[in-house]
Image (cartoon, grey):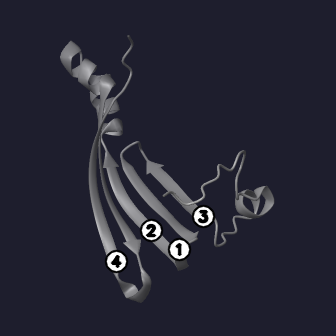
């Protein structure tokens, strides 16, 4: 047997003034806040938090990243090789190291690597 499930149309439990404008969380809403700072299309600094349903206190997050976007732009501008130009125009590699701080000074660390394929047309 399934519990009595009902679909909430529209915004559901979201209150526009409290949840989206004032950025207040409650026992029905998990609020995520974050900032991403990019420097020279190469270095990435992130900072944020989340709190609300299921979290007694806000959890802080932060991270550092590196992307090849800036370096590839520099290589692309100084190269006449069509293979290098193709690679630097269509591929981006990113590495991230992120931390989530929990209660009692415990911390979880995540590492990630992503490959982006960009600028392709069909």
**SS at circle 3:** strand
Do residues under tags 1 and 2 come within 8 Å of each other at their CB atoms?
no
Q: Residues within 10 Å of mark 4 (few under 14, many from 20)?
A: few
> Which residue has dot 2 on it?
61
> Which residue has dot 1 on it?
54
Q: Earlier in the sequence, mark 1 or mark 4?
A: 1
Q: Gap between marks 4 and 2, in whole Å?
A: 9 Å
Q: Earlier in the sequence, mark 4 or mark 3?
A: 3
**SS at circle 2:** strand
Q: Along the horizontal axis of the image, is 47 left or right of 5?
A: left
Q: Earlier in the sequence, mark 3 or mark 1?
A: 3
Q: Earlier in the sequence, mark 1 or mark 2?
A: 1
Q: Gap between marks 4 and 3, in whole Å?
A: 20 Å
**SS at circle 4:** strand
Q: Earlier in the sequence, mark 3 or mark 2?
A: 3
- Whether residue 57 is visible to the viewer of this picture, yes or no, is no
Residue 121 higher or lower than 92, as above or below: above
């Amino acid at each position: 047997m399934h519990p009595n499930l009902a679909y909430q149309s529209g915004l559901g439990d979201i209150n526009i003034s409290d949840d989206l404008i004032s950025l207040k969380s409650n026992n029905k809403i998990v609020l995520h806040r974050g900032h991403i700072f990019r420097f020279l299309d190469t270095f990435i600094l992130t900072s944020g938090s989340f709190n609300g349903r299921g979290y007694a206190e806000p959890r802080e997050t932060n991270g550092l990243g590196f992307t090849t976007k800036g370096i590839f732009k520099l290589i692309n501008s100084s190269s006449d090789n069509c293979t290098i130009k193709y690679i630097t125009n269509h591929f981006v590699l990113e590495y991230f190291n992120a931390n989530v701080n929990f209660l009692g000074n415990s911390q979880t660390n995540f590492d990630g690597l992503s490959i982006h394929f960009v600028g392709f047309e069909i």
